[in-house]
Structure formats: structure tokens, C-alpha cells
Image: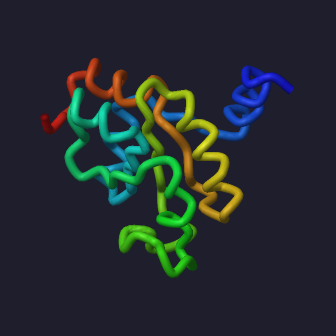
Amino acid sequence: MRIEELLAAARADLDRLDPAQAAEVQAAGGLLVDIRYAALRERDGTIPGALVVERNELEWRLDPVCEHRAAEASGHDLRVVVICDEGYASSLAAVSLRRLGLRHATDLVGGFQAWRAAGLPVTP
């Protein structure tokens, strides 16, 4: 299988969100999770209120039953929107979270770059 096929299969199981929909999820109490690495966050800024968890720690921090979980990982019913830089790695990450039982996990189409282009809040 090629990465393009793996990505297409991952996305087939997700109800991916556009930036406005992701903002609505956050406003309703859902969790935006920024998995971009530090250099991108430093370059472009962050989304106010988003939980920053680099990709290599994501499953440990978001698994509600893991002893290393983030306080925000309150349960398997939590709405989680994973955000990477352009919306590729986040699709694979969201599927991984779904395998952990976070059935409402999804990602942001176009990633952080789409969020910023939509004029939504960014903290420098």
C-alpha cells in the first residue's frame, strides 16, 4: 500500500471538518489538538485554547485511561479535532485516536494553514 492509499482509507472513516466547523466544535466544548512540531508553532503561532501535543505523544496524552493522559482527555465521548500544518498527518492521527476508542476524533481539512487563511484566531 502506498501512503496515498493509506491516507484515502483513513479519510474514508472520518467526518473531516472545515475551519468554521472546527471552531464550532471548540466553542461547544470540544478539544482542538495541535500536533505540529515546535518550529512550526514558533513560526506561525497557535490556536487559542488548543491543546498542544506533538505527534509522538498523541496517543498517550489523549487516551482517557492512560496514566500519562492530559487533563483535557476526559473520556471516550470527547469531540477531538486533530490539527497538523496542512491536514495530512492529522488524518492518520485521528484514525489512531479512533482506534483508542475516541469515536468522535476527526481532523481539520487543510490544517493550521486553512484555519489561519479563514481568518480565525491565532496567537503569535
**Quadrant that contains the C terminus:** top left
Q: Residue at x 30, y 50 (%)?
A: 50
Residue 54, how many percent across, how many down? 43, 49
Looking at the image, residue 121 sits to the left or right of residue 106; the answer is left
Q: Is residue 95 above or below residue 108?
A: below
Looking at the image, residue 123 sits to the left or right of residue 17; the answer is left
Q: Quadrant of residue 3?
A: top right
Q: Residue at x 38, y 49 (%)?
A: 32
Q: Kindly give the residue lying farthest to the right in the view shown.
A: 1
**Quadrant that contains the N terminus:** top right
Q: Is residue 76 above or below residue 83?
A: below
Residue 80, how many percent across, how many down? 47, 53
Q: Residue at x 51, y 56 (%)?
A: 58
Residue 95, how many percent across, how many down? 66, 47
Q: Quadrant of residue 97?
A: bottom right
Depth order, front residue of 40/114: 40
Residue 86, how many percent across, how many down? 45, 24
Q: Is residue 72 above or below residue 29?
A: below
Depth order, front residue of 121/37: 37
Q: Is residue 97 above or below residue 63?
A: above
Depth order, front residue of 23/89: 89
Q: Residue at x 40, y 70 (%)?
A: 70
Q: How is the image coloured?
A: rainbow
Q: Kindly give the residue lying farthest to the front in the view shown.
A: 39
